[in-house]
Amino acid sequence: MDFEAPEEHALLRESVRQFFERELPEARIREMDRERRIPRDLWKRLAELGWVGLSVPEAYGGSGGDVMAGVVLCEELARRFPSLAVDWVLLSMTARAFLEHGSEEQKAEYLPRLARGEFIMAFGMTEPSGGTDILGLTTRAEMAGNEWRISGQKLFTSLADDADAILVLCRTDPAPEDRRARGLSLLLTPRQQPAVTVRRLELMAMRAACTCEVFLDGASAPADALLGERGRGWYHLLSSLDEERTLAAAIYVGITQA
């Protein structure tokens, strides 16, 4: 069976290539790589082009693109600036997390801001003690009055230093015997507070993607910061990670082509 890509995918591919030629030359990319940072004004520019909100439905101010449109965008971004593609994947995951598990109030609050390039969220999953065993996490959260208090440490949390909030996977309830995935929740934790410390890590490549260590020392999050159902955070996260794997594959296709 032959596969013919829609015309809009070809137009998107050409638009990205023209953007790099016109606005983001290699010298500027190398500068951001040395600085280990993608400035917020670049995200604002990509938002103007409709790319930051590609995964956000039109009803919330986005472009309403499908997964294949995201694949095309990731592939073309990675051909010239892999760090930018890596961080864009996080923006796409953010949109999907809110769409599938957010309350109506959370969708109305965060999705339009995401599409405008005004909201960046990092995903706090991996921990130093657990490595790839995410279910072995030790970060805890409990209610104190009318807010959550979160304590623990995260590792390889991309975009954390530039994020407005970190979606922290943490234990809020005891796990039943042999069911470690139960009792984990996702808490939307404000980044700019004294109890959240972020340290950028040195990488060999994709340095501008800004992966970080995050220290949560009694960090606070409002009572309504819970994304999805309490105790079901790991299951909610899997749906976002499923799409992330597809987009990550597109990144490496773009790098290989380059």
Image (cartoon, rainbow, N blue to C red):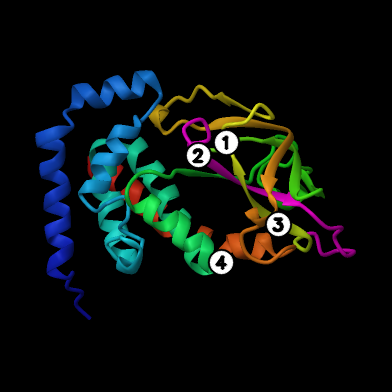
**Disc 4/disc 2 C-alpha distance (Å):** 19 Å
Identified at 46% across, 54% down, the residue is: 110
Q: Which residues are magenta?
A: 159-180
How would you classify the magenta stretch by its main secondary structure? loop
Sequence-wise, the earlier of marks 1 and 3 is: 3
Sequence-wise, the earlier of marks 4 and 1 is: 4
Residue 110 is labelled as none
Q: Which residue is mark 4?
A: 103
Q: Would residue 165 be counted in the magenta stretch?
A: yes
Q: Are marks 4 and 1 in contact (CB under 8 Å)?
A: no
Quarter of the picture containing the N terminus is bottom left
Sequence-wise, the earlier of marks 4 and 2 is: 4
Q: Is residue 154 above or below residue 97?
A: above
Of residues 161 and 241, the one nearer the viewer is: 161
Q: How many numbered circles are shown?
A: 4
Q: Which residue is mark 3?
A: 185
Q: Which residue is mark 2?
A: 164
Of residues 51 and 103, the one nearer the viewer is: 103
